[in-house]
Image (spheres, grey):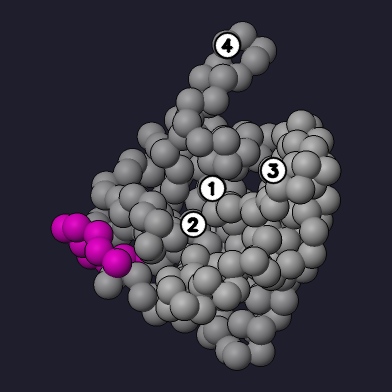
Amino acid sequence: LLALRISALCNDSALKSDGDKYQLLGDPTEGALLVAALKAGLDQRALHEEQPRLAELPFLSEKRYMATLHRAHNGKDRKAVVYVKGAVDRVLAMCGKVLENGIPREMTPEKMAHIENKNLEMASRALRVMALAYAECSPTPEQLSHEHLDGSLTLVGLVGMIDPPRQEAGQAVADCKRAGIKVVMITGDQKATAVAIAEELGLPAGRAVTGLELEKMSDEKLSVEIEKISV
């Protein structure tokens, strides 16, 4: 249940109970994580009482992850734990260990490749994939910094969720194609997920380019490549 605990605590959204229904306050992706945790019997409010948030690193587009510092689960003295969720490649780069059957083991190139393949497999099914990780701290740091996390994390696992396009999106793409309008899809998802969604929408096959790849292009190269880019 550690993955779901991280999902609920490293989370800035909340579920508001209204009788037998719930209202999401915040981001839909974070809401999906909260629902998954709740279905497993983990209530966010109870978790926060058990493990109060002590500090946080909010999600930044250039960092592509968020981190929260909490009192350790059943912890004593000054022990604390950092929970992290974010883009798979970014979080993996900070992991020196991986949790296997509840035991932290050294992250090897073979294990890293296996995890990367699983991420690609999930993303190719149009799933939005995130990595979940943690790091134990003793004593509790006075503040949380990105430097604290690099290489110190233990990967817990990957979580994938479906975020289907709106029903009218496919029809809009078809209408544009008939009118001779070139359609380019821009999304915050990783490349494999974006390509899979583009195929669902009926976008013509073309080149998919990440934001980082785009930033590295010169104006001259971009002017040549732009007609080939569809995602």
Neighbours of disc 1 within 10 Å: few (<14), some (14-19), many (20+): many
Q: Residue at x 65, y 15 (%)?
A: 21
Residue at the farthest bottom position: 109
Pick the front one: 165 or 134: 165
- Amino acid type of the residue tagged 3 in the rendering: Asp
From the image, tell me which residue sits under label 4: 18
- Comparing marks 3 and 4, which lies closer to the viewer? 3
Q: Are marks 2 and 1 in contact (CB under 8 Å)?
A: yes
- Does residue 92 sit above or below 78 in this rendering? below
Residue at the farthest left position: 142
Q: Main secondary structure of the magenta part?
A: loop
Earlier in the chain: of badge 1 and badge 3, it is 1
- Amino acid type of the residue tagged 2 in the rendering: Lys
Residue at the farthest top position: 19
Residue 46 x, y percent position in the rendering: 46, 32
Q: Residues under labels 1 and 3: Cα distance?
A: 17 Å
Earlier in the chain: of badge 3 and badge 2, it is 2
Q: Which residues are magenta?
A: 136-146
- Locate residue 7 relative to residue 172 in the image: left or right: left
Does the rendering let one see residue 171? yes
Q: Secondary structure at mark 3?
A: loop
The mark found on residue 85 in the picture is: 2
From the image, tell me which residue sits under label 1: 7
Placement of the C terminus among the 4 image quadrants? bottom right
Q: Residues under labels 4 and 1: Cα distance?
A: 22 Å
